[in-house]
Image (cartoon, rainbow, N blue to C red):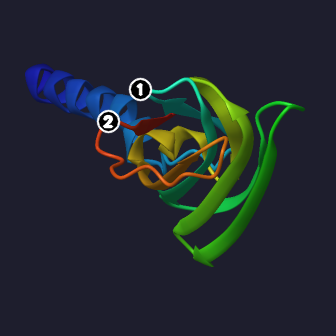
């Protein structure tokens, strides 16, 4: 009988230890900002149009006082961003997101680029944008 009680005690202790794992472990979303960085092969970019797709994107701001940013939320998961100025590689904008833990889920596509003299680049294949 003592062996049976001891087995039940071990099972009870193991069940109690496992209880915290049964709770809801989802952390609430943490709103914040993410940096939008441009990778460019040129030194005379003047404007870039970017599509930012990801969960809970809200708005965008210029990454520098030297830039102007114009944005529009296209859907709950997409923001179109135009950044104007004497653009250089690096952070060109920041965007507000509903949950910073989901920044890794964002995708960015450079849709169009023009030089500082308003000449549209024939290709955007050498351009990219990172979000962090």
Residue 28, relative to residue 80: is it above or below?
above
Q: Residue at x 49, y 51 (%)?
A: 24
- Residues 120 and 76: in front is 120
Q: Is residue 91 left or right of residue 68?
A: left
Q: Is residue 19 left or right of residue 65?
A: left
Q: Position of residue 79 (x, y in %)?
A: 59, 65
Q: Secondary structure at mark 2?
A: loop
Q: Residue at x 53, y 33 (%)?
A: 38
Q: Position of residue 43 (x, y in %)?
A: 55, 23
Q: Which residue is mark 2?
A: 126
Checking the image for residue 103, the label placed there is: none
Q: Quadrant of the C terminus?
A: top right
Residue 127, relative to residue 55: is it above or below?
above
Residue 31 visible, this angle:
no
Q: Is residue 98 left or right of residue 105?
A: right
Q: Residue at x 57, y 75 (%)?
A: 76
- Residues 23 and 132: in front is 132
Residue at the far right: name it.
Answer: 65
- Residues 27 and 91: in front is 91
Q: Residues within 10 Å of mark 1 (few under 14, many from 20)?
A: some
Q: Which residue is mark 1?
A: 41
Marks 1/2 in contact by CB < 8 Å: the verdict is yes
Q: Residues within 10 Å of mark 2 (few under 14, many from 20)?
A: few
């Amino acid at each position: 009988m003592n062996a049976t009680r001891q087995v039940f005690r071990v099972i009870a202790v193991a069940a109690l230890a496992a209880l915290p794992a049964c709770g809801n472990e989802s952390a609430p979303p943490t709103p914040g900002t993410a940096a939008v960085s441009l990778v460019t092969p040129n030194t005379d970019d003047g404007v870039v149009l970017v599509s930012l797709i990801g969960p809970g994107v809200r708005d965008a701001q210029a990454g520098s006082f030297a830039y102007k940013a114009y944005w529009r939320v296209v859907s709950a998961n997409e923001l179109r961003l135009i950044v104007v100025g004497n653009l250089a590689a690096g952070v060109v904008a920041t965007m507000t997101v509903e949950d910073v833990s989901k920044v890794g889920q964002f995708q960015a596509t450079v849709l169009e680029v023009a030089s500082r003299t308003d000449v549209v680049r024939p290709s955007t294949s050498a351009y990219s944008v990172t979000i962090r």
